[in-house]
Each structure stands twice: as structure tokens, then as C-alpha cells.
Image (tube, rainbow, N blue to C red):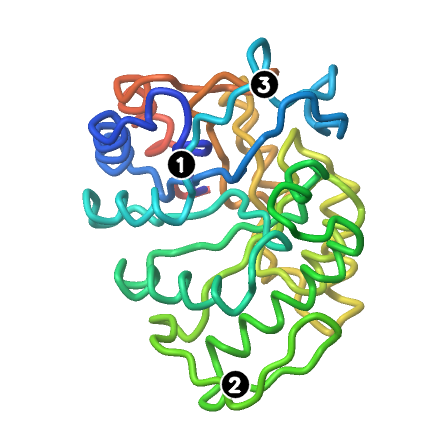
Amino acid sequence: MKFGLRSCNSGPFVDPARATELLQAGEEAGFESAWAVDHVVVPDGYESAYPYSDDGKIFAGVNTNARPDPLIWLAYAAAVTTRIKLATGVLILPQRNPVVTAKQVATLDVMTGGRLILGIGVGWLAEEFDAIGAPFEQRGKRTDEYIAAMRELWQSDSPTYKGDYVDFKNANCRPQPVNGTVPIVIGGHSRAAAMRAGKLGDGFFPARGAPGPIIELARRTAAENGRDPADLEITLSMPEDPNDIPALAKLGASRLMIPVSPMSGLTSVSTPEDVLRLRDIVEKYADI
């Protein structure tokens, strides 16, 4: 079992010194990865429903968005670490130009020695899309196409792609990722996210709980698309009771995520010292 720290670019860890302490504690404790979340803006008075809280709001109390850009934050993280993998969890892909994003991601992957994981999602906050000037409708179809276009740029000697939303020919894009591509983890709780993971993803992160049926849907979709379901890496949230970890492993999880800021119903840590105290759990379950 691998263990990751999520929402690392939030709360006190917006501060560079605190971020350094967190990341280095994660490496020392044996964490496999550190994940940074994404919201460019969160407009006041939004009416879109956040899918992971009872009141439909992403923040309790004051509406704020105190989180740095994930890719830039991860570039800083790369400079103060040597081993821990660096991931977006999740980058809201349909808000971004896929050609520019492919270039940024490949550059960061090369500069980190191949440590990057790209977690992506379709987004839920329509008002944020409006502020950016990105279309909210058909964001799922855009996401599918953006994934294909980015992989073409990463893997082809003469990248060419023609779709409904992306169109380029012989678009040389260097550098390319260290390992030929960057793993793409699909985040989300919906059937559409599970099917996208099965069809296109290298991994699936359902975001909350351990939803067996949604994981099975992802695997079944992989098989239906001629892919090996066993190759789909499953990431789940850390259970409240570590004794439940073997059961999650049997469900297919190979990575468990612990948020560094409180999230309802989830085990969390709030200081580097908290992270270090988890070393025993990380070591105990490393081989299951």
C-alpha cells in the first residue's frame, strides 16, 4: 500500500516555509506522494452545488480560495524534495488549454526526474468557468479529448490531433515526459468519472469513502475497452481505523490519501509532526 498527502497547497502550507516542512516530513515518514488541489477562483455567492458537503459549499464560514496554483506550487515542492512523487489532485482540465497544459506538465515532469502524476477532474463550479471564460457545457467531452491530445503531444515524434475542440498538426512539443508519458488519475464520484477512468485513465480516485460499485464500474469499463482492469490504479481515502486498511486493499486500493486539512468524515493531519507520527502505519502496511 502506498500513502499520499492531499490538499497540500492549502491552509498553513500556502506559506513556503511550512510547505517545505510538510513535504520533507512526508518524505521522511515514507509517504509516496503529495497532491495539490486546484481552483483558480471561487466567486462569492456561487449557486453551483459542491458535491462533497451537505450544504453544497466548498468552504465552511468565510468564502475564500487561499490555495496557490497547483503546478507552480508543485514546482516549488520539487525543489525542496528528492523522492516523493508530486501530483495534482485534481487539476480542472477543461478550464485549461490542453496544449499549454501538456507543455507545462511535461516540463515539470522532466525537472522532477519523472516524479509527476496528473490527477484531473471535469469541475463542478460553473461560476468559476464563467470567470475564466471557459465553457461549462460539454466539459466531460472536452476532458476526454484534452487527455488524448496531451498524450499525443507527450508521446509522438510529430504530434498531430484533430478533434471537435483541439486541432494541431506536426506540433513539435519538447521536452517530453521522462517515462514517455505522465500517469493520469481520474478524480470524481460519479458514474461518468468511473467510466472515464476505465476508458482513459491510468488510475481512479473516487474522492470519498470506498464505493465498491463505482470501482467495479471503472474496471468493467476498462475491460469493455480492451484494457486490463488490473492496470487501473485505485486510490481511496484513508479510513478512520487503520485496521480497515487490509479490507481496502482487498477492494483493490493501492494508494490511500490523507488530507492535510480537516475534511468531514476523513482522517486528516494538520502539522508536519502529525505526518511523522504516521510513519509506523506507513511502514506497517507498505507490503500489503
Q: CA distance from mark 1 to mark 3?
A: 16 Å
- Residue at 34% across, 42% down: 73
Q: Earlier in the sequence, mark 1 or mark 2?
A: 1
Q: Is label 2 in a helix, a strand or a loop?
A: loop
- Residue at 59% across, 12% down: 60
Q: Nearer the viewer, residue 143 or 254?
A: 143
The reply to whether discs 2 and 3 touch (Cβ–Cβ < 8 Å) is no
Task: Name the amino acid, label 3.
Answer: Phe
Instruction: Say which residue label 1 marks.
Output: 68
Quadrant of the rendered image containing residue 266: top right
Above or below 140: residue 11: above
The reply to whether discs 1 and 2 touch (Cβ–Cβ < 8 Å) is no
Q: Is label 3 in a helix, a strand or a loop?
A: loop
Q: CA distance from mark 1 to mark 2?
A: 31 Å
Q: Nearer the viewer, residue 23 or 146?
A: 146
Instruction: Say which residue label 2 marks.
Output: 159
Instruction: Give x and y (percent) for residue 123.
Output: 67, 43
Instruction: Give x and y (percent) for residue 272.
Output: 27, 22
Q: Which mark is residue 59?
A: 3
Q: Nearer the viewer, residue 200 or 13?
A: 13
Placement of the N terminus among the 4 image quadrants: top left
